[in-house]
Image (cartoon, rainbow, N blue to C red):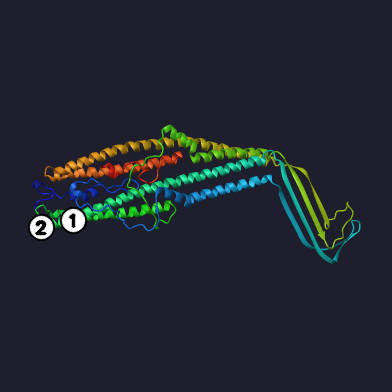
Amino acid sequence: MARATSRSPANTPRPLFLILPLLLLASPLPAVGQSLPGPDADLPAALRSSEPSREPIDATPPTGRMFTLDEAVEHALAHSGLVAAARAETAIFAAKLTAARWEHWPHFKFDTLLTPMAGQRGDPMNGRTDMNDWGIFSRTELTGYLPLVTFGKIHHLKQARTLGVDVGRAQEDIARAEVRYQVLKSFFALSLARELAAVVREGRDYFDKAKRHVRKLEQDDDPSFDPVDKMKIRVYDAQVMQHDLAARRALALAIGQARRMVGLDPQGDADFATRPPAPIEPRLTLALDAAIEAAVRSRPELTALRRGVAARRSEIAARWAAFFPDLVLVGRFTYGYSNVADPQNSPFANDPYNSFSLGGGIALRWDFEIGKKLAEWREAKAQEAKLQAQLDDAERAVRLEVEKLFREMEDARAMLAAQQDALRAARSWVLAKTDLYENGLSELRDSLDGLVQFFTSQMTYLQAIYDYNASVAALERATGLVLVPGTTPEDQGGPSARESAE
C-alpha cells in the first residue's frame, strides 16, 4: 500500500488536516505569561472544513462575579493586604502627629491618696500621736503646665511628624502601584492562558478527526492508507494529551492567580472578562525625556525618600532646640484632709493633714544633659546624610530603570509590527503551499513547512503582544503614570492575533 506522504494522482484529495497534530507537537506549548499560541480565523480550506467551536477547555459557565480589568484593580486596591499594611503604617504616623500637636495644649497630672492614719493631736510646739484614735487621711494634688516658649521644639516636632504622614501616604502609593501592576500581569497571563486552552481544544478536535479519517481509510481499504499512520497516531495521542493537560493546568492556575491578586480565594468562583491577546494602546504618548521627568517627579519611592529627608532635617532642628530651656506657665492645686488630725491655725505651721493651696506662675525648665543631647543631635544628622545618599542613588537608579523600560517598550513595539507583518506573510505562504499540495503539485513536506511557519509566526506574534503589553505595564509602574487602559474593545485599540492574520 502506498504511504500517505507519497506522490498520488492529482485528482486524489489529500487529508491536510492530518498535519495539525504534527504542528502542535513541532512547537511545544510555552508557559503561561511567556508565549502562548492562539488560533487563526483563516486556516487553510482543508483545516476550515467542519471547523470545531472555539470554546475554552474549561467551558463551565461562571457562577461568581465577573470582573473587568478596572473592577479587578479597584477590588484589589480595596482588599489587598499590601495596601492595608501601608495604610496601617500611615495611621501610625498620623497618631504620632496627633501626639505632637497635643504638646501645645496644657498638660495635667492628678494624684490622690486615701489611707488610715493614727490621730495627730496638739500643735507644732506640743504634738503627739494617739495610737488609740484611728481615722482616715486623704490628699489630692492637681498640677499642670502650658508651654509658652520652647525655642522651636514643638514646631519642628510637628513638622517632622507631618512629613512622616507624607512618607506613609507615599508608601500607600507604592503599594497601590505594585498591586495594579500585579493585577495587570495576571490579566495578561489569563488572556493568553485562555487562548492556549482554545487552540489546544481545537487541536484535540482536529486530531480526533484525523484518527477517525485514518480508521475509515483502513476500513475502506483505501490505497492511501499506511499502517505506520496508526502507530504515529498512538504516539501523537499521548503527546496531545500532555499538551491538553498542561493547558488545563495553566488555565486553572492563571485564574487562581488572578483571583489571588484581587484579594479573593484562588479556589473561588469569581471570573474575569478578558479579550483575546491584543496590543494595548497606551493612554499617553511619552518621549524618553518626558518619561524620565515624570518618574523623577511622580515615582512614589522617590517621594517617600524626599519626605523622609525633610523629616530628618526637622528632627535635626528639634534636637538642636533641645539645648535651650522652655518657658512654661505652671499651676498647682493641693487639698488635704484628716478627721483625726488637729488643724493648725498658724500660717507659719506646716499642716500636711488639713491643707488647701492654689497657685501658679511662669517657670523656666532646663535639662542640662548636654552629652546625651549632643549625641542625639549628631545621630539625627547622620540619619539625614544616610537618607540623602539613598535618595541621590535612587534618583539615578530610577532614571536608568525608566530608560531601560522605555527602550524595551519601543523595541517591543517595533517587534510587534515586524511580527504582525511576518504573520501575514506566513499566512500567504501557507495558503499558496496548501493550494499546490491539494492539487498534487507539491510534496507534503512543503505544505508542512508552510504550516509550521504559519503557526510559529502566530506564537511569535502572541509573544510580541505579551512582551509589549508587559513593557507598557512596567513603564507605568516605573513612571508613576497611568498608561494601561481598561478591558473594553474601545479602550484597547490594537488588533488581536486573529485580526492581525487577516
Residue at the extreme bottom: 132
Q: Amino acid at mark 2?
A: Asp
Q: Residue at x 48, y 49 (%)?
A: 82
- Confirm whether residue 397 shows in the render: no
**Residue position for label 1:** 211
* 2 and 1 marks in contact (CB < 8 Å): no
Task: Look at the picture and state if 79 lies above or below 491.
Answer: below
On the image, the x and y values in percent for residue 239 come to: 24, 53
Q: Is residue 78 visible?
A: yes
* Mark seen at residue 85: none
Q: Residue at x 12, y 59 (%)?
A: 219
The x and y percentages for residue 351 are: 85, 55
**Which residue is tagged 2?**
220
Relative to 268, say whether 312 is above or below: above
Task: Report which quarter residue 284 is drawn in.
Answer: top left
In the foreground, 494 or 132? 494
| Quadrant of image for the C terminus | top left
The one of 335 and 401 positioned closer to us in this rendering: 335
| Disc 2 from disc 1: Cα separation | 14 Å
- Residue 105 in picture, x, y percent from top left: 69, 46
Label 2 SS: loop
- Helix, strand or loop at disc 1? helix
